[in-house]
Image (spheres, helix red, strand yellow):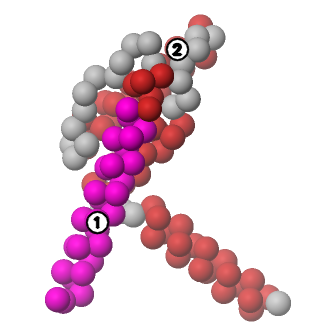
Amino acid sequence: MGLSQIKVKIHMERMREVQQHLKNEFEIYNNAASKKLPPTSLGNTESLEVLLECVTRRESLGQARTQGLPPSSKLKAAIADTLLLLDNFDIKISKDKGAAERDSLNKKAS
């Protein structure tokens, strides 16, 4: 198996992981919400962008009306993570690289 095939396999595994997380957060939010979110396609960028906009609007309107809406930060983070992966950017890898660079700089400074 070549390097590019390994990268594709890792990307696909990460995509499944992120989409499952999004599905779970979607269900948690919907179970707590009085008005359910519309069904969405987890692999469709446009559908996810509409979902993110819908959740953000509800949050804004809910705060303006002081309605009791379920927390949406985890759902919005899961949507954003999925959108980034669909755009071939893995925030998890980026955070890991940033942490490794900080550790390296801290060791040099010591």
Q: Residue furthest right?
A: 110
Q: Is residue 55 above or below residue 42?
A: above
Residue at horizontal 45%, vertical 19%?
Answer: 33
Which residue lies under the disc numbered 2? 61
What are the residue bounds of the magenta stretch? Answer: 1-27
Report the side of 100 relative to 81 (left or right). Answer: right
Residue 41 sits above or below residue 38 on the image: below
> Which residue corresponds to the image point at 19% horizontal and 80% vertical from the top-left?
5
Q: Secondary structure at mark 1?
A: helix
Q: Secondary structure at mark 2?
A: helix
- Position of the N terminus by quadrant: bottom left
Q: Which mark is residue 39?
A: none
For image coordinates 66% across by 86% down, the residue present is 104
* Residue 28 x %, y %: 44, 32
Please state the horizontal and vertical placement of residue 76, each as a whole percent of the image. 46, 38
According to the picture, the residue beneath numbered tag 1 turns out to be 13
